[in-house]
Image: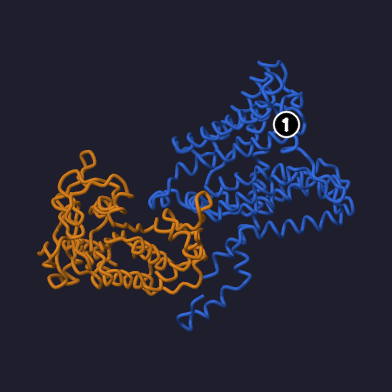
Chain colours: A orange, B blue
Amino acid sequence: MSNNKTNGGTPLLELHDASKFFGNIVALKSVSLRLYPGEVVCLLGDNGAGKSTLIKIFAGVHQQSEGGFLVEGEDVIFDSPRDALDHGIATVYQDLAMIPLMSISRNFFLGSEPKIGFGPFKRFDHNFANRVVREELMKMGIDIRDPAQPVGTLSGGERQSVAIARAVYFGAKALILDEPTAALGVKQAGTVLRYIAQARKRNLGVVFITHNPHHAYPVGDRFTILKRGRQLGTWTKAELSREEMITMMSGGEELEKLSDEIEEYGV
Amino acid sequence: MTATTTTTDERLVERSLLTQLLNRPELGSVAGAIAVWIFFAVMAGRSFLSLGGTATYLEVAAELGILAVPVALLMIGGEFDLSVGSMIGAAGMTLTILAAHFGWPLWLAILAALGLSLIVGYLNGWLVVRTGLPSFIITLGSLFIIRGATIAITRLLTGRTQLGDVDEAAGFALAKAVFASDIAIAGVQFPISILWWVLVVAVGSYILLQTEFGNWVFGVGGSKVAARMVGVPVDRVKITLFMSTAAAAWLIAVIQAVNFTGSDTLRGELREFHAIIAVVIGGTLLTGGYGSVIGAAIGALIFGMVKQGIVLAGVDADWFQVFLGGMLLVAVLINNFIRQKAAETRR
């Protein structure tokens, strides 16, 4: 079990002994996590493991009830998602990444519109927006035909990829990806995994949340497994085989019990 | 298009000119306007085709079109405003009472009416963002509150529900020139309200398509939560939109009050629905996030052509509402079809 990566330097994000309570419900208990530039940390766990609560702390939606949260070595408390963004932490949510009826470039720059002109006559710089969108997506290896086409015409994997490209363009140092592959088919998920690897190559830190070990294992450098709000541990890829990971995530005994039960029904 | 791979070119072919056209929200309304124009050109002939006939339907279109522009923006932003019709009555009566009953200079009365409209618009928007209730319900409430208050206060102050003599207020001549004069083109008088309409459409369309605020309108209507997540001031956008619909109601009220030199407490009734019809015919989605100001203008144009065309064609004007409702249904079906086609461009 290695919570420390001998990477040198300060981690991008560091959570130590963080807990989150909602009333008398313990959503997270004593979770510690570090994210360095240029690595992918996979956050694994079944439903109800506390993954969402954890990313909402990173994203500035929630604040931890106990423990510390450091960004590049400095203690922070985020009041809003905007706060997190200003610290270079971009969160891409599974279903909120893009607005389907808007064009790709309008989506890309929503909330941070590029402008041209003077004073009250400043207008949205469509040429700039379209050019940047095409270039940025090209860097991620996505070749779009027309930045003015509605996002709704993109596939699910492409939408996630555009959202990731947007986060990278707006200076994100750390990417928090909330189940980006959950609703996708095998091939689409592959597309997104490739962009995660791309982002790592560009020296971003990525927290990749998933409940699918087959998606996590190929891109992850380190793996943190959560279960019922607690941290089972953090392992490097060398320390953990895919099979061990699966067993640990779901709780091996429970799975065996389940297969026994199913056998009883005589399937 | 910077082609990087050979596949780029191949895939470009798929996106034909037709699908590009189909992606324009106003396409259906343009086709509809042409069809309606041809229909009445045949049915009514010269009386519809003449400059004089054109002026009459453009005037009807203008007085709806001014309202339809901000209503379109608001609906793209994901909200309804059912109170705009009542607001026309309230703004008109406010300036008439102030100018004719209390003897205010007309321009001061006009400004006071604008102030009232902006306050009402702000309150509508504030209630919607604060309560989180559907704007349909909130503004249905204000529809009745505003209309009722207009009638009650007018009767309380003047003992009547109709009031004239606006032309005796100071500054009427200038107001008449700005809001209710005619411009002669080839011997035919075109009311200046048509110019106001064109201006409002130009400004509205520019704001929607070419400004940061326009992008926010699309975003807020498309997904409030997603827009807020990327830093769009969602509440401010919505409140501003409600203020703009009220301001448009004020402009129409001023044009009418000056033109008729007086107001009626019932003026503007059903206008909220006519505006929504024009906007929907123009290709704007009822659920928000998609639509067009130009389309709303064309929707208003269709409204004007049908309303006047029926009279000019010698058909009983009672049939107008039947026609209007039918057109709304057809427009919604066509728009649905077009949007599905547009979404199919890829898969």
Residue position for label 1: B257
Tell me if residue B92 comes above or below residue A3 in the rendering.
Answer: above
The answer to whether one can see residue B347 in this image is no
Q: Position of residue B190 (x, y in %)?
A: 80, 45
Q: Quadrant of residue A136?
A: bottom left
Q: Amino acid at mark 1?
A: Ala
| Residue in the image at 46% along x and 51% along y | B223
| Residue in the image at 50% along x and 37% along y | B125
Tell me if residue B188 comes above or below residue A99 in the rendering.
Answer: above
Q: Quadrant of residue A257?
A: bottom left
Q: Position of residue B183 (x, y in %)?
A: 80, 45
Tell me if residue A202 comes above or below residue B288 in the rendering.
Answer: below
Q: Is residue B161 left or right of residue A223?
A: right
| Residue in the image at 69% along x and 34% along y | B254
Secondary structure of the residue carrying numbered label 1: helix
Asked whether A124 or A267 is in front, the reply is: A124
What chain does mark 1 sit on? Answer: B
The answer to whether one can see residue B74 in this image is yes
Q: Is residue A263 left or right of residue B44?
A: left
